[in-house]
Image: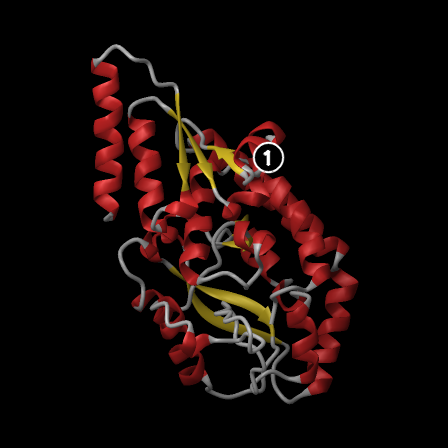
Amino acid sequence: MCVRDCARNLGAALDDLREQGRSVTAVFIDADGLALPAVLPAVQAARDRHVTAYVVSDLVRPMHSNRLLFQLFESPVVRVRAKPPNGAVRRAKRVFDIAGASAALLVLAVPMAAIALAVKLSSPGPVLYRQRRIGLRGREFQFLKFRSMVVGDHHDVHREYVQALIAGDVAACDQGDGQEQVAELKMADDARVTRVGRFIRRYSLDELPQFWNVLRGDMSLVGPRPPLPYEVEAYNEWHRQRLACLPGVSGLWQVGGRSRVSFDQMVFMDLFYQLNQSPVLDAIICLRTVPAVINGRGAG
């Protein structure tokens, strides 16, 4: 079933029930049983008719809290906000970002100095890596990381990998163990990565300078990861919806699956976060980021 048909059919069914005088207060949408691009239009069809939408999927596990519904569906269930985030929510999010990033830079000043020294001594080149990324509504900004690779222009290998990943070519992106194909969002065994770089990437320590991007307003503490320009060139229409949200240092897929999710699953999780974003949800994701980073799973 195509994306538009799913939303149209759900909307028509809800309209028919209303005409019959049968009140519908909630719908449950099985995201694992639909094509992912069809889920959010179906949610919007319910929203437009003032019907509460619940999404059932293992992909929403980091946002799951209702134990009763979990026992009923044997899968995480999340209630979607009735309305999109308003100006007050966005202002509260910005205050949370400034406070959180300032505190992180203060607390992590000494570890960041040690990482900078290790990067400088491990290989020739600058300590910080500056890169063009695409942010809110397609605006470019300068993205900061601790340098984890040897100096040089090595984008062709990564460009080809990303294009295959976005296209869903699992075989070309297989980083499994010979028994299970895993198309990860980050390249494993990347020859460009230095010895120190491999360690700081595993525990996401290379990402710490991005708290400065948060203070500048280019990023948020929580949101979609900012893509490279050549990634955006490979996007299809529904992927581009993730550019409607300020990019983040962490996000739903980082705490849910780290990089061991497909590209479409990552996009779905980013878009689902956009529907439900709030300072409280941001705080929950930030708290869950810490054990995910310490575990180091999927952060190649």
Residue at mark 1: 280
Taking depth in this image into account, of 136 and 184 the one nearest to the observer is 184
Q: Name which quarter of the figure residue 188 lies in.
A: bottom right
Is residue 297 rendered to the left or right of residue 153?
right
What coloring was used for the rendering? Answer: secondary structure
Amino acid under disc 1: Val
The number of numbered discs placed on residues in the rendered structure image is 1
Residue at the far top in the pictured view: 21
SS label for mark 1: helix
Provide residue 240's location: percent of width, then percent of height.
Answer: 32, 55
Relative to residue 30, is residue 179 drawn left or right?
right
Q: Residue at x 37, y 72 (%)?
A: 169
Q: For the C terminus, which image quadrant?
A: bottom right
Mark 1, Cα crowd under 10 Å, few <14 / some 14-19 / many 20+, is: few
From the viewer's perspective, is residue 201 above or below residue 122? above
Please name the residue shown 40% across and 84% down the image: 156
* Left or right of 270 on screen, residue 114: right
Residue 258 higher or lower than 153, as above or below: above
Say which quarter of the image contains residue 160. bottom left
Residue 133 point in image, percent of width and height: 43, 65
Work out whether 14 lies above or below 169.
above
Residue occupying image coordinates x 34% and y 18%: 24
Please identify the quarter of the rendering in which residue 18 is found.
top left
Name the spot of residue 80 as percent of width and height, x first: 45, 32
- Residue 32 is situated, as x and y percent measured from the top left of the image, at 43, 47
